[in-house]
Image (cartoon, rainbow, N blue to C red):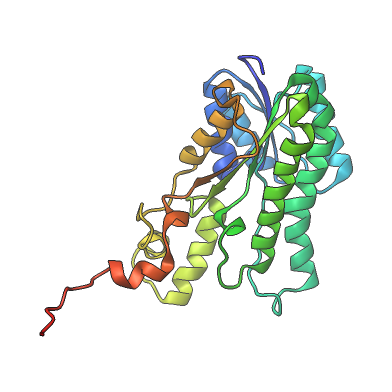
Amino acid sequence: MTDQRVVVVTGGGTGIGAATARLLRASGHDVVISGRRPEPLHRIAEETGALACPADTADPDAVHRLVETTMAQYGRIDGLVVNAGVGRGGGVGDLSDEDWDLVLRTNLTGPFLLMRAALPHLLQAHGSVVAVSSVSALLNGVGNAAYAASKAALLQLCRSLCVDYGPQGLRANVVCPSWVRTEMADRRMTRFADDAGLTIDEVDEAYEEATRLLPAQRPGDPREVAEAISWLLSSAASFVNGAVLTVDGGATALDPGTIPFEFHVTRRDVKH
């Protein structure tokens, strides 16, 4: 890729996508941000100078308009950050057809459609794709069937780009965040706080409770994930392809089976 890149960021109006747009624009790159809601996109566009292009990437026609708009404005696509996502809780026996379809359509079909539409331009630019997956692609949790399945499939979809198109100069890598303070995570923490009966600063307290056993003992900041994404897009990561980078405060390094031995354990004298 050239030093000044053209990068399309989905889910660019909030959270990790917005942080990525801010960071890339501050570094001098041209950025197109996409998402289903125009209002947050336009706020980030006004703040950063990114080009807002509202689109539901699960809609093939909207995907083609997004790619065509980017090419008309900038003439190339060097990078693609596949970040848009939704979640719906529930185990296999609890999920409705509608919730399953929404999660898979947004988190997997949408990225596939956009990758396919942008692929010729990415190949021409010897470009780079970064998919924002989740530690849920690697470790599962209770009531997380649709989201975990979609993020695991997204991980492998992105790595297939590496295998199939790496010989033509395309790089494709994956970041897997754990809890990061975003609007979507805030909503989940609000529900958790209500269920747990937390009463002080409910969202902050919920994050503290949810991350207290992690090595970092805090949620991530969207900027921290954006830094990893920016690096993977850059020429500094030119030999990194098909990688799965956990940006998780150590969550996936921790063996849950050791937790009872590491926290609040007092040594007892043994009598012989």
User: From the viewer's perspective, is 158 left or right of 60?
Assistant: left
- The x, y position of residue 32, in whole percent, is 69, 29
Quadrant, the N terminus: top right
Quadrant, the C terminus: bottom left
Q: Quadrant of residue 150?
A: bottom right
* Residue 173 sits above or below residue 25 on the image: below
Q: Inspect this view and state whether residue 256 appears.
A: yes
- The x, y position of residue 216, in whole percent, is 36, 52
- The x, y position of residue 37, in whole percent, is 70, 45
**1 or 7: nearer the eye?**
1
User: From the viewer's perspective, is 216 left or right of 114?
Assistant: left
Farthest front residue? Answer: 272
* Residue 103 sits above or below residue 156 on the image: below
* Residue 158 sits above or below residue 104 on the image: above
State the residue at coordinates (77%, 41%): 55
Farthest top residue? Answer: 3
- The x, y position of residue 179, in whole percent, is 48, 55
Q: Inspect this view and state whether residue 56 appears.
A: no
User: From the viewer's perspective, is 251 left or right of 170?
Assistant: left
Farthest bottom residue? Answer: 272
**168 or 249: nearer the eye?**
168
